[in-house]
Amino acid sequence: MVAAACERCRMTHFEDPMQYTVDIKDNSAKIKITGRLTFKFHREYKEFLDELLKNKVGSYEFDLSGVEFIDSAGLGMLLIAKQKAQVFNAAVVLQRPPENVRRMLEVAKFDKIFTIQS
């Protein structure tokens, strides 16, 4: 039993951090997120989002192809991006989610809230 708990701690401790790159051109911000979009990284995401939204563009395109896992907090982070972008009428588009992430988006009915592109 102890070994299982230690293994779980090790897996959590060495969890790949969320990483991102941003490319802003014309009236669009392309954001590529890799790693895990989870509660563990919500503070980093909030700081990133606050900086990103200082660039008021017409659309924010989140490339999720490198996201390994998303939890309910990660879904909430995407909702926050949409809510904040709507203040200045900007679109938020989710692009290329892997199958496991796409399933989470669909279960949460994000396909009704966001434009999701394959």
Image (cartoon, helix red, strand yellow):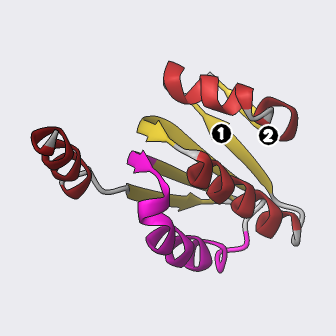
- Across and down, in percent, residue 14 comes to 18, 53
Left or right side of 82 for 98 = left
Rendered image: mark on residue 94: 1
- Tell which circle, 2 or 1, labels the residue nearer the N-terminal end: 1
- What amino acid is labelled 1 in the image? Leu
Rendered image: mark on residue 114: 2
**Which residue of the protein is positioned furthest toward the left in this rendering?**
3
Left or right side of 49 for 88 = right
Q: Badge 1 local density, few (<14 within 10 Å), some, or many (20+)?
A: many
Q: With respect to residue 103, does 76 lie above or below?
A: below
Say which residue appears at 46% left-offset and 48% top-offset. Answer: 32
Q: Is residue 20 visible?
A: yes
Q: Badge 2 local density, few (<14 within 10 Å), some, or many (20+)?
A: some
User: Which residues fall within the magenta stretch?
Assistant: 33-56
Q: With respect to residue 28, does 49 lie above or below?
A: below
Quadrant of the rendering where the C terminus is positioned: top right
| Mark 2 to mark 1 CA distance (whole Å) | 7 Å
Quadrant of the rendering where the N terminus is positioned: top left
Q: Are marks 2 and 1 in contact (CB under 8 Å)?
A: yes
Say which residue appears at 23% left-offset and 44% top-offset. Answer: 8
SS for callout 2: loop
Left or right side of 89 for 44 = left
Say which residue appears at 63% left-offset and 59% top-offset. Answer: 77
